[in-house]
Image (cartoon, helix red, strand yellow):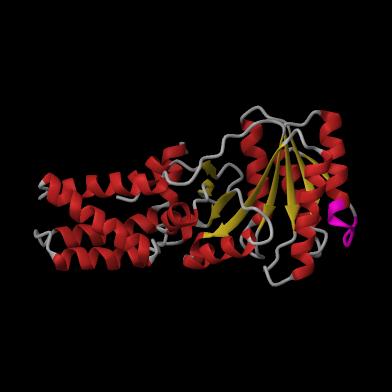
């Protein structure tokens, strides 16, 4: 399945909820106050967030008046333009190599699966990859990551369950430097921001990577479950208080009608969505593209 087709399929539920309802609104014919109020409610229901929804609609209202918009097609074009601009507020990430990508997030969002997909993604880009089993807290976490390493034919560095996560990362860096690995992907234990000991562990991992491999690019990517909607925004804020969140990987986008949360993340938090999950397979991950994303909403 091609990249555009995968993104289209992943956004199917959001598109059906959004496009069908906006068509119904536009069928009324009048761009009056009632139309704009209902459009605001629709954007909020897709988890755009209250303030972004209000501001997008206000901008659309001004644009429509200035450009004398009347037709449904012109309204859609204007909305696409406005939403794309909103999504381009966040700074974009350009990968340089070698790079250390530390994967963080709460339990159950699909971190380990995402790491397997990322490994395959970078391999498809002709980059060498090593995985680090830094989740020594959860039972069988390293075994699960090993399965993904085998599926993606990727090297993995791991210690016994209960080991010091920072020590595993230290060994992973030593191995990556010796092998001249392009991409080192570090798994970490799922945690809530209230788990002080685990948040301190994340900080320690950050100190180790910075000290042992200063010449590498260092990125912290938080994995978020798109089905949680606005709760995803709260998770970013919570983690960002302890470790800098550089980018977002959004999973389960294919299972929700609330894909508008992407706009809230990029517009309000100025954090880029770097990858989106587009299905269950190992190749079902795509780099995020704002224009493609908005095109597939309608």
Q: Which sits in the foreground, 174 or 286?
A: 174
Please tell me whether residue 128 is drawn above or below residue 50 in the rendered image.
above
In this picture, which residue range is highlighted in magenta? 160-166
Q: Is 274 left, or right, of 64 in this rendering? A: right
* Quarter of image, res 164: bottom right
Q: Residue at x 55, y 55 (%)?
A: 251
| Rendering coords of residue 161 (x, y %) | 87, 60
* Residue shown at the point (36%, 60%) measured from the top left: 52
Q: Residue at x 64, y 35 (%)?
A: 122
Residue 83: in magenta span:
no
As for residue 164 lying within the magenta part, the answer is: yes
Observer-nearest residue: 288 or 139?
A: 288
Residue 61 appears in view: yes
Q: Is residue 280 visible in this depiction of the protein?
A: no
Q: Residue sitting at 76 percent across and 33 percent down?
A: 215
Q: How many discs mark residues in the rendered view?
A: 0
Q: Is residue 48 left or right of residue 79?
A: right
Above or below 176: residue 80: below
Q: With respect to residue 82, does 122 lie above or below?
A: above
Residue 104's spot in the image, x, y percent?
67, 56
Residue 289 image position (x, y, % from top left): 45, 41
Q: Nearer the viewer, residue 35 or 200?
A: 200
Residue 175 place in picture, x, y as percent: 86, 36
Magenta stretch, main secondary structure, is: loop
Kindly indicate the quadrant of the structure image that contains residue 157.
top right
| In the image, farthest residue toward the bottom | 194
The reply, left or right, for residue 1 in relation to residue 31 is: right
Nearer to the camera, 174 or 117: 174
């Amino acid at each position: 399945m091609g990249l555009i087709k995968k993104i289209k399929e992943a956004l199917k539920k959001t598109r059906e909820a959004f496009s069908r309802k906006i068509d119904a609104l536009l069928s009324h014919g009048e761009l009056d106050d009632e139309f704009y109020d209902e459009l605001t409610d629709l954007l909020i229901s897709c988890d755009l967030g209250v303030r972004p929804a209000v501001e997008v609609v206000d901008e659309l209202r001004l644009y429509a008046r200035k450009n004398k918009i009347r037709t449904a097609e012109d309204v859609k074009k204007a909305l696409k333009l406005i939403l794309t601009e909103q999504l381009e507020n966040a700074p974009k990430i350009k990968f340089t190599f070698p790079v250390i990508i530390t994967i963080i997030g709460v339990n159950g969002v699909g971190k380990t699966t995402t790491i397997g997909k990322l490994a395959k993604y970078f391999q498809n880009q002709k980059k060498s990859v090593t995985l680090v089993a830094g989740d020594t807290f959860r039972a069988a976490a390293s075994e699960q990551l090993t399965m993904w390493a085998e599926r993606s034919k990727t090297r993995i560095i791991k210690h016994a369950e209960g080991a010091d996560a920072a020590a595993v990362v230290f060994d992973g860096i030593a191995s990556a430097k010796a092998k001249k690995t392009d991409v080192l992907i570090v798994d970490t234990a799922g945690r809530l921001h209230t788990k002080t000991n685990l948040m301190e562990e994340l900080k320690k991992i950050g100190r180790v990577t910075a000290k042992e491999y200063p010449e590498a690019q260092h990125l912290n990517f938080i994995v978020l479950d798109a089905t949680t909607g606005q709760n995803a925004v709260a998770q970013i804020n919570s983690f960002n208080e302890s470790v800098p969140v550089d980018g977002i990987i959004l999973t389960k986008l294919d299972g929700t009608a609330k894909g508008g949360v992407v706009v809230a993340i990029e517009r309000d938090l100025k954090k880029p969505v770097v990858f989106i999950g587009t299905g269950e397979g190992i190749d079902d991950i795509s780099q995020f593209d704002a224009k493609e994303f908005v095109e597939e909403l309608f």
